[in-house]
């Protein structure tokens, strides 16, 4: 009976060690600014420590317990500083800020910096300290080969030739020329018209995939611009009217007409 | 022909200033870089200029103000300063520096040897570290920089910022704001301008919507005319 209870105590202590170690790891990750300090439920973590404290028998276990408790106090300190920081004027959500930084052009970022920058005026002169600093820099500078390793640059593949099929599969080369594609689509448009000689733009352009729809819309724009078809807006519908022959258009009367694929297909915009 | 000696403009007689010699000494102390960092420490100024060094610095500041410069007092970063266990002194040991009072233009910054790219990268680095409460991992900063400057360049840029004192790196690979950022950059102004800035995408989106609406209206009017 005693053996059984000893065994169960050992099992509990082992699972306790795992749980407490996990709490400690989370605390350390928060200290390294990997997570928001409020992600950790401090009350629950303390309850975990309290739960397993009677199981500790060895010095290592007590040390683990003490380290975890110490780390938890650091997390509380970080939570406090986070609250103070969020209420300050300097507060900016890191994710929002990194999105903003990505979207701002380089010159704009430089201009923002110049508004807040007051550079120090200093006259450089060679002193013993600066000479020592320069020497130290060159002594500590790692060879280029070692610095390069940080980039994990793998060796480039040996150049090889690509055949036409590979280029087509990669989308670099087209199976048919551009003019052939235009002619094919023009014929398709002429075949699909109703008794009035017109057909709905979206019905003609829309296909299963977004890429194919965008490609057809792109080609139709050329057919309309070059006078192979006319695009008209009637009762909120866009109608295509193919001509049997190319028409000469008055270039001065041409207007641009943007059509958004996003509104029809959702997601990406043409 | 007689040669007339060039006329030297008569300078108005000024009464000798009480601080004149000390002002010069203050200028030498603040302008010339003696150690690793520019400027002078408080104890240096007290030793060389006397107890009323703050008055001398005020006078010096007035003179500098006419040249768009100012004397800036920077609090010593306690965490970065070496701890002297023997010293019992409780006095502050701030650093005094001379810096530009107002803004610098983009062309002026180029003349100072700063590339626009580097200034933009510095903005990104400092603002990101500020947004992470003054401490961000170097890898994260490099990742953000690499989106605009490439991976290799972003690593070099971070090295430059560390070397020039804008950020400092600890042994765990965390970047913190350096002494130069604290001395030169008005963080509140930087963050305010950055958060107020309109992104390139939102500018282009609004302009495209306006253009399409205009074109649509133009097309409709032309159709009704015909």
Image (cartoon, rainbow, N blue to C red):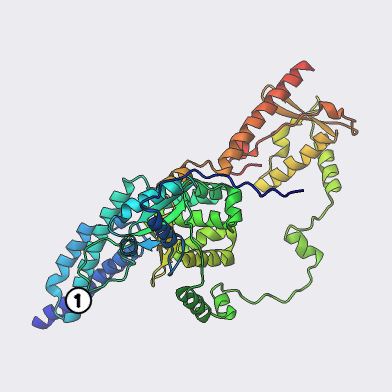
- Looking at the image, residue B213 sits to the left or right of residue A150; the answer is right
Residue A1 drawn above or below residue A32? below
Residue A9, given in percent of the width and then of the height, sits at 15, 76
Residue that protrudes farthest toward the left in the picture: A2
Q: How many marks?
A: 1
The residue nearer to you, when weighing A213 against A76, is A76
Mark 1: few, some, or many residues within 10 Å (few <14, many ≥20)?
A: few
Residue A212 drawn above or below residue A79? above
In the rendered image, which residue does mark 1 sit on? A63
The residue nearer to you, when weighing A219 against B200, is B200
Dot 1 falls on which chain?
A
For the point 81% across and 26% down, which residue is it?
A: A195
Residue that protrudes farthest toward the front in the picture: B1
Residue that protrudes farthest toward the top in the picture: B225
Where residue A16 sits, quadrant-wise, is bottom left
Q: Quadrant of the C terminus of chain B?
A: top right
Where residue B86 sits, quadrant-wise, is bottom left
The residue nearer to you, when weighing B111 against A73, is B111
For the point 72% across and 77% down, which residue is it?
A: A158
- Looking at the image, residue A90 sits to the left or right of residue B198; the answer is left
The residue nearer to you, when weighing A227 against B137, is B137
Observer able to see residue B191: no
Residue B57 drawn above or below residue A26? above
Helix, strand or loop under label 1: helix
- Looking at the image, residue B148 sits to the left or right of residue B29; the answer is right
Where residue A81 sits, quadrant-wise, is bottom left
Observer able to see residue A249: yes
Residue A170, given in percent of the width and then of the height, sits at 72, 61
Residue B81, given in percent of the width and then of the height, sits at 32, 67
Residue A65, given in percent of the width and then of the height, sits at 19, 72
For the point 85% across and 36% down, which residue is it?
A: A226
């Amino acid at each position: 009976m005693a053996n059984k209870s000893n065994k169960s105590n050992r099992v509990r202590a082992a699972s306790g060690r795992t749980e407490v170690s996990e709490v400690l790891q989370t605390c350390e990750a928060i200290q390294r600014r990997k997570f928001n300090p409020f992600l950790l439920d401090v009350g629950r973590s303390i309850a975990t420590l309290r739960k397993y404290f009677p199981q500790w028998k060895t010095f290592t276990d007590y040390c683990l317990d003490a380290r975890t408790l110490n780390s938890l106090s650091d997390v509380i300190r970080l939570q406090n500083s986070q609250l103070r920081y969020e209420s300050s004027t300097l507060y900016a959500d890191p994710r929002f800020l990194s999105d903003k930084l990505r979207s701002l052009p380089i010159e704009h970022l430089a201009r923002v910096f110049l508004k807040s920058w007051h550079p120090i005026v200093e006259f450089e002169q060679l002193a013993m300290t600066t000479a020592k600093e320069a020497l130290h820099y060159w002594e500590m500078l790692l060879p280029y080969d070692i610095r390069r390793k940080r980039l994990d640059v793998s060796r480039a593949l040996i150049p090889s030739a690509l055949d036409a099929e590979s280029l087509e599969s990669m989308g670099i080369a087209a199976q048919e020329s551009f003019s052939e594609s235009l002619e094919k689509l023009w014929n398709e448009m002429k075949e699909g018209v109703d008794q009035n000689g017109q057909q709905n733009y979206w019905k003609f352009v829309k296909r299963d995939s977004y890429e194919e729809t965008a490609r057809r819309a792109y080609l139709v724009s050329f057919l309309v611009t070059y006078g192979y078809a006319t695009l008209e807006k009637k009762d909120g519908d866009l109608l295509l009217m193919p001509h049997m022959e190319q028409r000469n258009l008055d270039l001065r009367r041409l207007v641009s007409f943007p059509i958004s694929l996003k509104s029809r297909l959702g997601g990406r915009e043409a | 022909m007689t040669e007339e000696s060039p006329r030297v403009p008569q300078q108005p007689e000024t009464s000798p200033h009480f601080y004149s010699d000390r002002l010069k000494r203050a200028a030498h102390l603040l302008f010339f870089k003696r150690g690793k960092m520019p400027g002078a420490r408080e104890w240096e100024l007290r030793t060389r200029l006397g107890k009323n060094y703050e008055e001398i610095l005020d006078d010096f500041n007035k003179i500098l103000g006419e040249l768009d410069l100012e004397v800036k007092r920077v609090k010593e970063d306690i965490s970065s300063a070496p701890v002297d266990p023997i010293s019992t002194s409780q006095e502050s040991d701030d650093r005094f520096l001379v810096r530009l009072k107002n803004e610098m233009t983009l062309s002026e910054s180029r003349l100072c040897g700063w590339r626009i790219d580097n200034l933009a990268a510095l903005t990104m680095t400092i603002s990101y570290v500020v947004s992470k409460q003054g401490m961000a991992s170097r890898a994260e900063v490099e990742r953000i920089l690499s989106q605009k400057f490439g991976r290799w360049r972003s690593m070099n840029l971070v090295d430059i910022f560390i070397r020039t004192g804008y950020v400092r790196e600890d042994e765990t690979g965390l970047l913190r704001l350096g002494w130069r950022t604290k001395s030169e950059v008005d963080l509140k102004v930087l963050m305010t301008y950055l958060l107020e800035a309109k992104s390139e995408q939102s500018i282009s989106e609004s302009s495209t919507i306006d253009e399409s609406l205009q074109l649509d209206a133009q097309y409709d009017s032309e159709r009704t005319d015909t």
